[in-house]
Image (spheres, coloured by chain):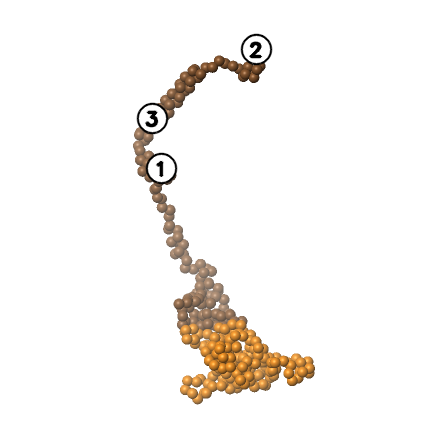
Chain colours: A orange, B brown
Amino acid sequence: MIGLKGLLNVIDNTGALKVECINVLKVKTRLKSTGTATVGDEIVCVVNKARPIPANEVIKNPSSSSNIQKIRKGDVRRAVVVRVKKTVQRVDGSVVRFDDNAAVLLNNKGEMLGTRIVGPVAAELRKSKGGAAGAGGRWGKILMLAPKVV
Amino acid sequence: MRVDRCDFSGYKVYPSRGKVYVRGDSKTFRFLNHKSESLFLQRKNPRKIAWTQVYRRMHKKGITEEVAKKRSRKNVKVQRGIVGADLASILAKRTAKPEVRAAARAAAITKAKTEKRDKETAKVANRGQSNAPKVSKQAMKGGKGGR
């Protein structure tokens, strides 16, 4: 249940550590829509806390140091929710709950910004179909990179 | 159907019951009910809470009946024949009366004695027949006695 001003940990290697939700990308006026984000939903977020960028890297080559664009505090990005504290009911009757809310940052096309994921992700990511990744559903790449899918 | 165990209480968790909790270090825990979950999140030790299975196992609760059952078993003797003597002959020997047995023993002794005597007499008779001229061992070797 991620809504406006909801805080999430970032579990990829983009450099962002903590983000705040500023919009949930859903049609909130629809009858069955909750308007809050859960696992597999896309959000817009602002970076509240980021890993500091080393000073020498900025001086040497300010424009293109590496493929990964560095994330700074205050950046606005899209992200996908991968873990939620609120319980999620599954089709087989089981109920799963995580320790924290977590997200993975995306670019405007819906592709992952980072190249690595630390920590487990929820299996609900498999449910969303289509998207850029193709075969593995929309979040196939995240599921592939994650060390554990619970 | 898969039945799991509650990670706190040790009770059975049937499908559609309980809750799975995934910790930050990606360890998963299964709880039967909110009571167990709550106590786990309070970092209570199940070994110190009296109703959990771990505690009961530690303090040997509710296992006295099994012990009593085990003790009631006894060895049962069965009569059966062994090699060289079947059951019928053993039983016959055991049921025979003392007088009969004594008589049988006496008969056996007398029989053995007569047999021995016969043998000895036969031996003596044999010795008498084959009485060859005596030659001392020294003579056979070509000693003094032969000259």
Q: Residue at x 44, y 58 (%)?
A: B60
Q: Callout 3, which amino acid?
A: Ala
**Viewer-nearest residue: A68 or A100:** A68
Marks 1 and 2, how far apart at CA: 67 Å
Percent from the top left, x then y, of residue B99? 31, 29
Mark positioned earlier in the residue sequence (1 or 2): 1
Q: Which mark is residue B147?
A: 2
Which residue position is annotated with label 1? B85
Q: Nearer the viewer, mark 1 or mark 2?
A: 2
Q: Residues within 10 Å of mark 2 (few under 14, many from 20)?
A: few
**Chain on which label 3 sits:** B
The secondary element bearing badge 2 is classed as loop
Which residue position is annotated with label 3? B107
Question: Would you say the residues marked 3 and 1 are in contact, meaning their CB atoms lie under 8 Å apart?
Answer: no
Q: Nearer the viewer, mark 3 or mark 1?
A: 1
**Viewer-nearest residue: A144 or B145:** B145
Q: Which mark is residue B40?
A: none
Q: Callout 2, which amino acid?
A: Arg
